[in-house]
Amino acid sequence: MRTIEWDEKKDSLKLIDQTLLPQEYKIVECKTLAELIDAIQRLKVRGAPALGVAGAFGVVLACINEKSKEIVKKKVERLKKARPTAVNLSYGVNRALNAAMLGKSTQEMKTYALDEAKKMADEDVAVNKTIGEYGSDLLEDGDVVLTHCNAGRLACVDWGTALGVIRTAIEKGKRIEVIACETRPLNQGSRITAWELLQDKIPVTLIADSMSAAVMREGKVDKVIVGADRVVKDGVINKIGTYMHAVVAKAHNVPFYVAAPLSSFDLKRSYKEVVIEERSPEELIFFAGKQIAPLMVNVYNPAFDFTPFELIEAVITERGICSKM
């Protein structure tokens, strides 16, 4: 199935629970807006494009059994704040909400929002395929590509942004291998990216985040491709650790690319104007349920960092490759 699907019979949203991967593949169901907000905050659904579409379907959930447009507006404000850094979430909510407000009755509001959410889901797949077409031209036969976090089909509705570029290149007959950084502290690279690539029989090697400098110095990386949670006027905000890989890539003359849909662009803001989500200290103090640090230690746990454009070779979008931002 797609990462996100609407169940017509149950009026609910079905999601792949990404917190359980790779041990278990499980579909969870969100019947209420509160359940969806919880799923987003717990990272059962994650990735900027996926959050945008989930936000749109969240408006549908908010419209069910509500008669007041004002109440729906208030309910979805909580949804937009569920994770503040990725611009796609508020983009998806606003787009579906605008559609819902055209309805005169509760049923019409829900119908209009649902139509818009489904449209966004289909658009996401098409956009990712187009990003893949443009980006695949940057990869050469035999390339080894390093990636960070997960910007694959599980971060989108399907196909993926950074991994979509790799998938498309492979479809065109190019031999591509991937080095996946584990992406501490929640290990989206080891848990999700490695699992996703192995499902598609794409050669992948897992490394610790701290190994990227060593493998680039050893000449084992030809390109770096990552996704983006928000593209601002002075650079790219993405999963914590991205900046480190970009600095290392620049030092070793390895091209560093970002693959992102235009819905992730927020060019009116600088990175200093964006709220960087800080997550629970427990994500660093515990690992897989086991304590690995003193309980009373001070913890700094931002989920994202900023990479300036001067470290980025190009941003790959559905409109083409932007080499000068």
Image (cartoon, rainbow, N blue to C red):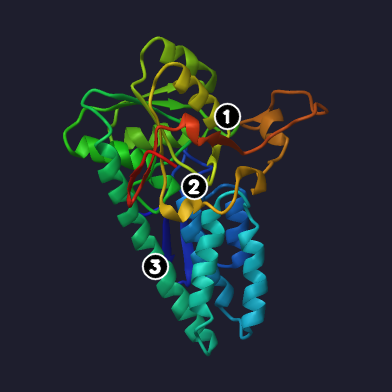
Res 16 visible: no
Number of other residues with Cα within 10 Å of mark 2, as a class: few under 14, some 14 to 19, many 20 or more? many
* Viewer-closest of 193 and 225: 225
Instruction: Answer left or right for 208 relative to 290.
Output: left
Q: Tell me the quadrant of the picture where the C terminus can be found.
A: top left
- Which residue is found at the position 46% from the left and 49% from the top? 26
Mark before the other along the chain sequence, 2 or 1: 2
- Which residue is found at the position 19% from the left and 31% from the top? 174
- Mark identifier at residue 184: 1
- Mark identifier at residue 318: none
Amino acid type at circle 3 is Lys
Helix, strand or loop at label 1? It is loop
- Mark identifier at residue 47: 2
- Which residue is found at the position 52% from the left and 46% from the top? 229
Q: Is residue 228 above or below residue 298?
A: below
How much space separates mark 2 and mark 1, taking CA atoms?
16 Å
Mark before the other along the chain sequence, 3 or 1: 3
- Which residue is found at the position 25% from the left and 41% from the top? 168
Q: Is residue 199 above or below residue 153?
A: above
How much space separates mark 3 and mark 2, taking CA atoms?
18 Å
Mark before the other along the chain sequence, 3 or 2: 2
Q: Which residue is mark 3?
A: 118
Q: How many marks do you count on the picture?
A: 3
* Viewer-closest of 91 and 156: 91
**Residue furthest toward the right?**
296
Res 277 visible: yes
Residue 238, percent from left and from top = 53, 39
